[in-house]
Amino acid sequence: MAMAEVSKYLMHRVTVDCNYYTSLNLTKLDVLDTFETIKIAIAYKIDGEELDSYPADLDILNRAEVVYHEMPGWQRPTTNARTYYDLPKAARDYVEYIEKFVGVKIKYIGTGPDREAMIQRA
């Protein structure tokens, strides 16, 4: 089974709290087009206990177990999408999950290497 692991969103949640972002740019959505399942890291555990925040200590981070939220992949190309609703439903669900998890709206979604491969949401 093809599976992608996405762990950067835990760190984004920390930076949102520090920097007061009002929107984010999600790039390379198209890289996930072929995966059956997408695993999103949502927390860390040490000795079975979930940590309240991202571990700032490298030793703790190295010992931590990652907690994942799994979502179905969309297994369809997103590179030709020019509006949000051109994206497969599972891709939109992924974007909306990240927005809810991070707490900030995703205003721009990159769907390919070309300059025009950028969806702008209102």
Image (tube, rainbow, N blue to C red):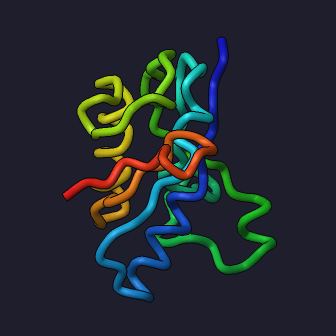
User: Is 38 left or right of 92, judged from the image as shown?
Assistant: right
Please state the total of marks drawn on the protein image. 0
User: Is 80 left or right of 99, judged from the image as shown?
Assistant: right
Q: Within the image, what quadrant is residue 54 found in?
A: bottom right
Q: Quadrant of the C terminus?
A: bottom left
User: Is 98 left or right of 122, judged from the image as shown?
Assistant: right
User: Is 102 left or right of 45, judged from the image as shown?
Assistant: left
Counting from the top left corner in percent of width and height, residue 30 is at 55, 34
Counting from the top left corner in percent of width and height, residue 23 is at 33, 70
Outermost left residue: 122
Q: Is residue 31 above or below residue 28?
A: above
Outermost top residue: 1
Say which of 112 and 88 sits in front. Answer: 112
| Residue drawn at point x = 63 percent, y = 38 percent | 5
| Residue drawn at point x = 53 percent, y = 30 percent | 38
Q: Is residue 39 above or below residue 18?
A: above
Say which of 27 and 83 sits in front. Answer: 83
Q: Is residue 78 above or below residue 43?
A: above
Q: Within the image, what quadrant is residue 83 found in?
A: top left
Q: Quadrant of the N terminus?
A: top right
Counting from the top left corner in percent of width and height, residue 42 is at 48, 51
Q: Is residue 111 above or below residue 60?
A: above
| Residue drawn at point x = 62 percent, y = 73 percent | 55
Q: Within the image, what quadrant is residue 102 found in?
A: bottom left
| Residue drawn at point x = 44 percent, y = 88 percent | 18
Counting from the top left corner in percent of width and height, residue 112 is at 57, 40
